[in-house]
């Protein structure tokens, strides 16, 4: 990135400090805080998202599941690994789930609370984890844009479940889609083309240079998960990948030569 491009990202005023203008995913190599900065704070909590933003991420990634009529930010099907609860998340009412300790006294957040915290400062990648949230997520995203003036580029909906992505697209085709893939790269590319997706999100274990070329040839960005080691970051940059999801965004960002300090 040239010095001019860098300075275009910064609004200088004579009276105050520098204010970073959000440019979302426009930098040559971007970093999403995976479940926030979950290498340092309890995953998928407001504290982890706040920390990721402080560390300078371009976006945060979070996992969403619908319980009752609420969209909860939570990764697993069970409460056991990340909270002081035990059992299936769907076996409890939201009122009980919201009393649990999700780590260091943090609560399981609602998606709407995370969006309020982020307040358009960085891109929010909402990964649909269950098989029923598509319409509710599409509705919330559409509301963000229409009622709260978020730009569509600040929101990116992804899932391994193509049916969920199809339903988001049918609800509002303007919502940017990211197609998660692991061992189904060809099928994922076909789906992405058919649904005018924005980006491909392959796992680090399955991505290869030819997939990156193929995805770029069809006009998709490529964001790889989950990348925590600098050697992998360097390999992704060499392959022309557009960005990564990382548990330790500060480590990735410090490695990027074109990042402002
Ligand atoms: O969205 C990237 C990544 O989060 C997908 O896998 O299991 O960490 O949600 P997982
Ligand atoms: Mg995820």
Image (cartoon, helix red, strand yellow):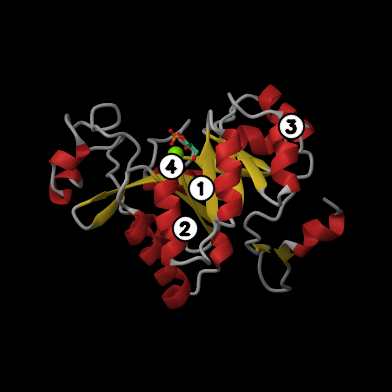
First-in-chain label (3 vs 1):
1
- Measured as percent of width and height from the top left, residue 126 is found at 44, 50
Q: Mark 4, residues whose alpha carbon is within 10 Å: few (<14), some, or many (≥20)?
A: many
* Residue 5 place in picture, x, y as percent: 81, 59
Disc ID at residue 210: 3
Q: CA distance from mark 3 to mark 4?
A: 34 Å
Per the model, the C-alpha gap separating discs 2 and 1 is 9 Å
Give the label, 2 or 1, closer to the camera.
1
Residue 48: mark: 4
Dot 2 or dot 4, earlier in sequence:
4
Position of residue 201 relative to residue 115, above or below, is above
| Residue 222 position in % (x across, y down) | 65, 42
Nearest to N terminus: mark 3 or mark 4: 4
- Residues 10 and 62: in front is 62
- SS type, badge 2: helix
In the picture, the disc for residue 60 is: 1
Residue contact at pointers 2 and 1, CB within 8 angstroms: yes
């Amino acid at each position: 990135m040239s010095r001019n491009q860098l300075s275009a990202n910064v609004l200088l005023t004579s009276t105050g400090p520098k204010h970073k203008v959000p440019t979302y995913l426009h930098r040559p190599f971007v970093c999403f805080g995976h479940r926030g900065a979950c290498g340092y704070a309890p995953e998928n909590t407001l504290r982890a998202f706040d920390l990721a933003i402080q560390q300078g991420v371009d976006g945060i990634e979070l996992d969403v599941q619908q319980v009752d009529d609420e969209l909860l930010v939570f990764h697993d099907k069970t409460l056991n690994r990340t909270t002081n609860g035990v059992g299936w998340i769907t076996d409890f009412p939201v009122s009980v789930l919201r009393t649990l300790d999700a780590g260091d006294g943090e609560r399981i957040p609602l998606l709407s609370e995370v969006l309020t915290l982020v307040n358009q400062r960085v891109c929010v990648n909402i990964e649909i984890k269950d098989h029923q949230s598509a319409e509710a997520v599409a509705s919330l995203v559409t509301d963000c844009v229409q009622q709260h003036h978020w730009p569509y580029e600040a929101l990116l909906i992804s899932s391994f479940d193509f049916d969920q992505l199809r339903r988001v697209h049918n609800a509002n085709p303007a919502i940017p889609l990211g197609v998660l893939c692991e061992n189904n790269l060809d099928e994922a590319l076909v789906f992405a083309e058919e649904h005018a997706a924005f980006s491909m999100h392959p796992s680090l274990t399955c991505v290869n240079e030819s997939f990156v070329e193929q995805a770029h040839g069809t006009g998709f960005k490529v964001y790889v998960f989950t990348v925590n080691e600098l050697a992998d970051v360097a390999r992704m940059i060499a392959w022309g990948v557009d960005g990564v999801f990382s548990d330790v965004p500060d480590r990735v960002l410090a490695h990027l030569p074109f990042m402002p300090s």
